[in-house]
Amino acid sequence: MSGRTPPVAALLPLLALACLTPLSAQELSLKRHVPGTDTISCPSIRVPARPGAEEQAEASRLASSADQALILGDAARAREFLARATELDPSSAELAYRYGRILEDLHETDQAIEQFCRALALGSRQEGIGDARPRLEALARARDPAVPQEASRAFLNGLLQADLRQFSAAAQSFATAVRVAPNWADAWYNRGLMRSRVGDAAGAVADLQEYLSLRPGAEDAILVSRHIGQLQAPVQVQSPATTLTLGLLLPGMGQFYSGRALGGFTVMALAGGAAAAGFLIEEVTVECVGSVPSGGICPPERIIGETSGRPYVVHGLAAAGVVTVAGAIEAYLKARGGGGGSAGTGRLSGRVSGPSFEARGSRLTLSILSFGF
């Protein structure tokens, strides 16, 4: 008689796999730029291939027409010629620089900055154009003027305190920056973010709305608006008794009920993995005629019967039960103590929303899981 019994260590990979929960977070992060304290950073620009001889010749002709238009005092016409020239030959640093100069003269600051950045990336220095970087810096400072020194010191101090998770102190520092520089949108944003971290939802909403009013075209406007909506959502009060009951009925349900979906997924995965491992691991016992050497295998012709069993079912179910009870007790204690991310603790709380649809005109957006912190 011989048997094959999988080691108990085989449970561990299954439990580890069960603990893996997809995590996708799109969170608001602090603004860290202080105007006037550093140089502008151009985006990464891919250098295009040089166009054919015909396109280069036409681009050169348009550049000459732009020069003639400037002599006649028609800067707008020169702008049109150079815009077309840079389209035909996007690899020319000289054309990008000249186009940037026209845009600078026409006070189209953002477009001029873009062209000077292109000129630098395309090798303006190698072509003897030495003032592309100084012009770029001057335009950036004019567009984003320096804030008072007191405001910048308070802002940097707020960043340091936020990194140390001293959110209340950080909010006070950003408040100083807002008071000294009331038109500094990033200071309003950072104070709003710190207020949301310490539980001041009304104050956070007011600050973030002020940020959007000062910078309506911000790249993160949609994300900030969603965060405002989350802060304005009514707060649900969980019953500790209900939390405990649900946690005992279904693994992780106590965490889901109390708004901690990440913890719920973890408890559910651990309990499910333990139970599944108990049912999946099977022991087969072979009845063999004659003796079999230790560690040997009974030849097929000598097998007179096989019996199979799952000796770890009880162990797996017991482990799942322990995880379920522990998870329910943890959820109960969190609910009784006011939740895992209460105001003033300085901890970030996780929020997870389930499947949702959003329709805008002919566009339909499906969100499977949305994580926020």
Image (cartoon, helix red, strand yellow):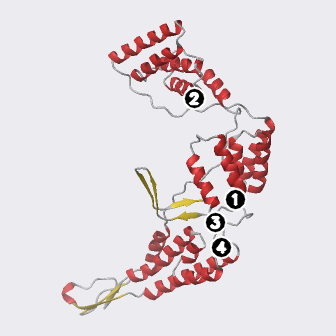
Q: Is residue 166 visible?
A: no
Query: In the visual, does 86 lie left or right of 111?
Result: left
Q: Amino acid at mark 1?
A: Ala
User: Residue 186 in the image: x percent, y percent?
Assistant: 68, 43
Local crowd size for mark 3, using a 10 Å CA cut-off: few (<14), some (14–19), many (≥20): few
Query: Which quadrant, please, contains the N terminus?
Result: bottom left
Find out whether the residues at labels 2 and 1 contact each other: C-beta distance under 8 Å.
Answer: no
User: Residue 330 in the image: x percent, y percent?
Assistant: 63, 77
Please report whichever mark, 1 or 3, sits nearer to the chain's N-terminal start: 1
Please report whichever mark, 4 or 2, sits nearer to the chain's N-terminal start: 2
Q: Which residue is mark 2?
A: 110
The answer for how far apart the CA atoms under marks 1 and 3 are is: 11 Å
The answer for how far apart the CA atoms under marks 1 and 4 are is: 16 Å
Q: Amino acid at mark 2?
A: Asp
Query: In the visual, does 327 lie left or right of 317?
Result: right
User: Residue 252 in the image: x percent, y percent?
Assistant: 54, 76
Q: Which residue is mark 1?
A: 201
Quarter assignment of residue 326: bottom right
Q: Which residue is mark 3?
A: 234
Q: Which residue is located at x 70 percent, y 50 percent?
A: 207
Q: Which residue is mark 4?
A: 237
The answer for how far apart the CA atoms under marks 4 and 2 are is: 48 Å
Find out whether the residues at labels 3 and 4 contact each other: C-beta distance under 8 Å.
Answer: no
Q: Going by the picture, which residue comes out furthest to the front? A: 361
Mark 3 element type:
loop
Q: Which residue is located at x 42 percent, y 20 percent?
A: 84
